């Protein structure tokens, strides 16, 4: 199922109740969880990702949320948005009231039931990406009884469910009593959720260990212990997989991915997700910067040979879609290609007053994606735009980007769920988490689409915004990324690719080891 189909379903004025599913049954009988599955993770695990309240508009935190926590609704196999802690929900005809009925029998790891107060508390403490947009839309939250919660909006907003249930962590529920007891920092040291796995231990810079939650409402997990081991170096990850020290590895590239593909007993698993990569120009609003000139930004885009990069780094599995918006998203507009043309790039630089090129500054990037950024640096340098790569550990990189600490260039990337509007809200429109500056015409159109209930008119407005993004060269899109994972011989089901568009293993209760 595509994300466009899911979002069209959520955007209807009166949402169809899902009560026909019926009350939650007891988890199906299953053998007791057994064994250990170990992942070689490509980034250092950050405790901020343990807390749904701090999700930052990227997909990485969900690698942990799908294990530790559960949500009102969430993407699942075969369903772009499946009822989870919310058994059903309805919307009023005027789009101002949303009622959720909670699932009976769902419990936190403490044994306490999930209640409407926990849902309200989780929403109110949410402070991650799009928090202001989400909270400004809500007039009141009511809890008529422990199993029901009602959101009253200030105005009809077609993206309320998209943002609440898909693009943010606000709908992932934490236990109010426990958080109030231990505090926010205490929660990150020992998180408690309602997901299929419980927190066991965390060694910073080394690994996170999780134990099966056998009373999980959906089903009893098959694997008893999950270990997410931080191995930022690609060659070290592959060596660990070959030695049998880990069972699954993420983010392989180029020659190492080819090596993995050729290795007996190992499997290369490509997965085209929702993560678009782009080069962002944070100085385009500074009249003193060379990047202020559209011709310079267009030159940088013409300098990139995306097809060659895709073949060399992603073995051809990524998709060059010329946008920061995934092509599967609702309201996506297909931009025209900007072909690789170094001669045109040099001519544009000369027209802009830089016939000998210029110093483009630092190119800040997530260290895990440095292999993608290195060819970008080489291509830019080849046409005279001299830039220096600055790899930064992932959590710190996103904090720095959100805090507007970087100049020069930024490696933009996001694999978050949502639609074209949610991607634009976070990265293009005024006030977005990662927005350094904006354009009045785009901001006006963005406000217009947010209040538009007619899907066709809204689509036309969002298409116009994306046309303007392309025309202004706000960014130089690279591609829609295909994540290349590796599987070891013990793995029967790694969970990669079970959820459409999601790059990591999930749902974790479905992962399995081969029988001994």
Image: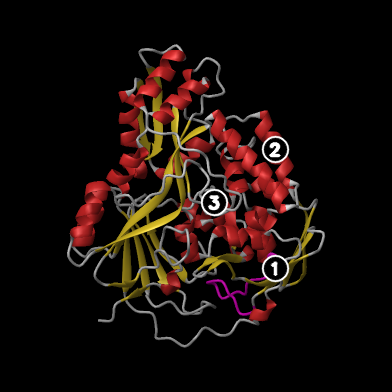
Residue displayed at 59% across by 29% down? 437
Residue furthest to the right in view is 94
Please state the horizontal and vertical placement of residue 126, each as a whole percent of the image. 62, 52
Give the camera-side residue of 410 and 143. Answer: 410
Classify residue 85 by image quadrant. Answer: bottom right
Q: Earlier in the sequence, mark 1 or mark 2?
A: 1
Query: Crowding near pointer 1: few (<14 within 10 Å), some, many (20+)?
Result: many
Query: Crowding near pointer 3: few (<14 within 10 Å), some, many (20+)?
Result: many
Looking at the rendering, the stretch of residues picked out in magenta corresponds to 104-117
If the image is split into quadrants, where does the C terminus sit? Answer: bottom left
**Mark 3 and mark 2 in contact (Cβ < 8 Å)?**
no
Classify residue 514 by image quadrant. Answer: bottom left
Provide the residue designation for mark 3. Answer: 55
**Mark 1 and mark 3 in contact (Cβ < 8 Å)?**
no
Give the camera-side residue of 212 and 280. Answer: 280
Q: Nearer the viewer, mark 2 or mark 3?
A: 2
Q: CA distance from mark 3 to mark 1?
A: 21 Å
Q: Nearer the viewer, mark 3 or mark 1?
A: 3
Provide the residue designation for mark 1. Answer: 116
Assess whether residue 115 is covered by the magenta stretch: yes
Residue displayed at 50% across by 33% down? 475
Please state the horizontal and vertical placement of residue 130, each as a whole percent of the image. 62, 46
Q: How many marks?
A: 3
Q: Is residue 240 above or below residue 467?
A: below
Question: What secondary structure is found at the residue carrying circle 3?
Answer: loop
Q: Earlier in the sequence, mark 3 or mark 1?
A: 3
Please state the horizontal and vertical placement of residue 407, each as a whole percent of the image. 47, 26
> Left or right: 160 with respect to 282?
right
Q: Earlier in the sequence, mark 2 or mark 3?
A: 3
Q: CA distance from mark 2 to mark 3?
A: 27 Å
């Amino acid at each position: 199922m595509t994300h466009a189909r899911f979002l069209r379903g959520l955007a209807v004025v009166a949402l169809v109740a899902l009560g026909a599913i019926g009350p939650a049954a007891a988890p199906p009988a299953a053998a007791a969880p057994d064994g250990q599955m170990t992942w070689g993770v490509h980034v250092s695990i950050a405790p901020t990702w343990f807390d749904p309240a701090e999700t930052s508009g990227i997909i990485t935190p969900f690698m942990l949320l799908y294990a530790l926590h559960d949500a009102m609704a969430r993407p699942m196999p075969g369903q772009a948005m499946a009822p989870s802690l919310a058994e059903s929900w309805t919307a009023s005809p005027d789009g101002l009231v949303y009622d959720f009925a909670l699932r009976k029998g769902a419990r936190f790891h403490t044994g306490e039931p999930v209640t409407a107060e926990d849902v309200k508390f989780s929403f109110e403490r949410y402070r991650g990406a799009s928090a202001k947009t989400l909270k400004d839309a809500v007039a009141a939250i009511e809890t008529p009884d422990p199993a029901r919660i009602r959101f009253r909006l200030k105005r009809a907003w077609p993206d309320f469910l998209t943002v609440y249930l898909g693009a943010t962590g606000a709908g992932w529920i934490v236990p109010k009593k426990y958080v109030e007891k231990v505090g926010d920092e205490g929660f990150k040291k020992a998180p408690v959720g309602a997901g299929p796995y419980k927190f066991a231990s965390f060694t910073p810079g080394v690994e996170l260990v999780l134990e099966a939650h056998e009373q999980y409402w959906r089903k009893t997990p098959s694997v008893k212990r999950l270990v997410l081991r931080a191995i930022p170096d690609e060659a070290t990850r592959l060596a660990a997989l070959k030695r049998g020290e880990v069972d699954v590895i993420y983010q392989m590239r180029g020659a190492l991915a080819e090596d993995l593909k050729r290795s007996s007993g190992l499997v290369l698993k490509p997965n085209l997700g929702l993560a678009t990569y782009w080069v962002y120009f944070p100085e385009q609003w500074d009249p003193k910067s060379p990047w202020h000139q559209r011709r310079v930004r267009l030159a940088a885009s013409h300098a990139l040979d995306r097809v060659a990069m895709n073949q060399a780094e992603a073995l051809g599995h990524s998709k060059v879609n010329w946008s920061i918006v995934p092509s599967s998203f609702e309201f996506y507009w297909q931009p025209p290609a900007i072909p690789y043309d170094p001669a045109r790039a040099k001519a544009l630089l000369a027209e802009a007053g830089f016939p000998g090129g210029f110093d483009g500054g630092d190119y800040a990037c997530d260290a895990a994606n440095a292999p993608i950024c290195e060819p970008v640096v080489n291509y830019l340098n080849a046409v005279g735009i001299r830039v220096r790569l600055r790899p930064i550990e992932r959590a710190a990189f996103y904090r720095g980007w959100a805090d507007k600490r970087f100049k020069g260039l930024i490696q933009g990337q996001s694999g978050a769920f949502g639609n074209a509007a949610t991607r634009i809200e976070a990265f293009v429109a005024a006030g977005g988490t990662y927005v350094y500056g904006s354009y009045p015409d785009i901001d006006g159109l963005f406000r217009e689409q947010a209040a538009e209930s007619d899907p066709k008119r809204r689509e036309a407005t969002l298409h116009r915004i994306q046309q303007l993004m392309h025309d202004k060269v706000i960014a130089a899109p690279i591609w829609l990324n295909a994540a290349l994972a590796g599987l070891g011989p013990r793995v029967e089901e790694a969970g990669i690719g079970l959820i459409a568009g999601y790059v990591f293993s999930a749902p974790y209760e479905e992962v399995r080891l081969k029988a001994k």
